[in-house]
Image: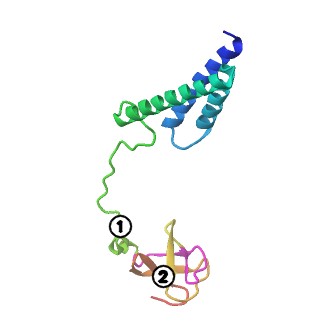
Amino acid sequence: METIELIGIIVLIAGFILIAVELVVPGFGLPGIAGIVCLVAGVFMVTDSVEEGILVTIVVIVILSILTAVVIGLMHHRKFKSPIILDTDVHVENTQLEASDLDYLLHREGTASTDLRPVGKGDFDGIELDIVSDGAYIKKGSRIKIVQISSNRLMVRNLENRKN
């Protein structure tokens, strides 16, 4: 056996290993591309004629089919942990935020972090919230107060122009 054929066999084995890694890791990336390149290069290194190349290519395809079936079987029977399959169940009872959940913010005072035209952001005790003015333009840095909560929208009023 010549050295080039021995290197070709090693390259073929490396190609099969890289393809197996690609079957387990999500996406089509470096292991898959490198595996394909190794398999093609290995076929060229091992064979001397077109007939041998076709035969080795058929053998490679059969081995890849068996390898794919084995990896999928291992993943299906949970003997092999896949990084793309979620093992734990997520139980959430209520994911919707109700307007009543925001009632604690009513009548809270803060400052406008941005200009409100009429939508912007406000700082309330170090927490920045999305807010809506009661229709008037409010300059950045103005003192504001949350006066109404409806449909998860926080309506504010400028305290510098109107006294409550």
Q: Amino acid at mark 1?
A: Gln
Residue linked to disc 1: 96
Residue 115 vs 85, above or below: the answer is below
Farthest residue to the top: give it.
1
Residue 12, picture quadrant:
top right
Residue 159 is situated, as x and y percent measured from the top left of the image, at 51, 85
Residue 147 vs 88, above or below: the answer is below
Q: How is the image coloured?
A: rainbow
Residue 100 is situated, as x and y percent measured from the top left of the image, at 33, 74
Name the mark on residue 7.
none
Q: Which residues are magenta?
A: 106-121
Farthest residue to the left: give it.
93
Say which quadrant the N terminus sits in. top right
Residue 51 vs 75, above or below: the answer is above
Cα separation between marks 1 and 2: 23 Å
The residue closer to the viewer here, 35 or 153, is: 35
Residue 38 is situated, as x and y percent measured from the top left of the image, at 64, 28
Question: Residue at image x 54%, y 25%?
Answer: 59
Question: Residue at image x 61%, y 79%?
Answer: 115
Q: Is residue 17 visible?
A: no
On screen, residue 137 versus residue 155, left or right, reads right
Secondary structure under badge 2? strand
The residue closer to the viewer here, 85 or 145, is: 85
Question: Residue at image x 50%, y 36%?
Answer: 23
Say which quadrant the C terminus sits in. bottom left
Q: Is residue 41 visible?
A: yes
Residue linked to disc 2: 156
Q: Amino acid at mark 2?
A: Val
For residue 115: magenta?
yes
Mark 2, other Cα within 10 Å: few <14 / some 14–19 / many ≥20: many
The residue closer to the viewer here, 100 or 97, is: 97
